[in-house]
Image: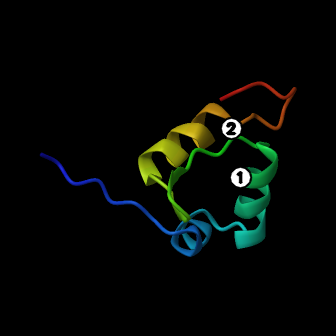
Amino acid sequence: MTTRILNTTKQESDRINIPIRTLAKARSTGFPKIPYIKIGRTVRYDPEAVDSYLANNTYNNEGGEKC
């Protein structure tokens, strides 16, 4: 069995360089739909899932086309 590394909100915030409050607001409002895992009151982020989300939501500066 493979062990997945899951990040805390602080670790993920530091990794993708956005404020902790932005991640908390995204969880609360559902927008943007940054994937997270909730176990009881504990929140964790799978870096691979977040990277995939970011790749799917990356746009070109010219004309707003997805990359």
Residue ranking furthest to the right: 63
Q: Is residue 15 left or right of residue 64?
A: left
**Position above or below: 13 against 1:** below
The percent position of residue 63, horizontal first and vertical second, equals 87, 26
Residue where numbered disc 1 is placed: 27
Query: Which quarter of the rendering shows the C terminus?
Result: top right
Residue where numbered disc 2 is placed: 58
Can residue 19 be seen here?
no
What residue is shown at x 48% (from left), y 43% (from top)?
49
Query: Which quarter of the rendering shows the N terminus?
Result: top left
What residue is shown at x 79% (from left), y 58% (from top)?
25
Q: Is residue 8 left or right of residue 27?
A: left
What residue is shown at x 64% (from left), y 46% (from top)?
34
The percent position of residue 30, horizontal first and vertical second, equals 76, 43
Mark 2, secondary structure of its residue = loop
Task: Give the amino acid at mark 2.
Answer: Thr
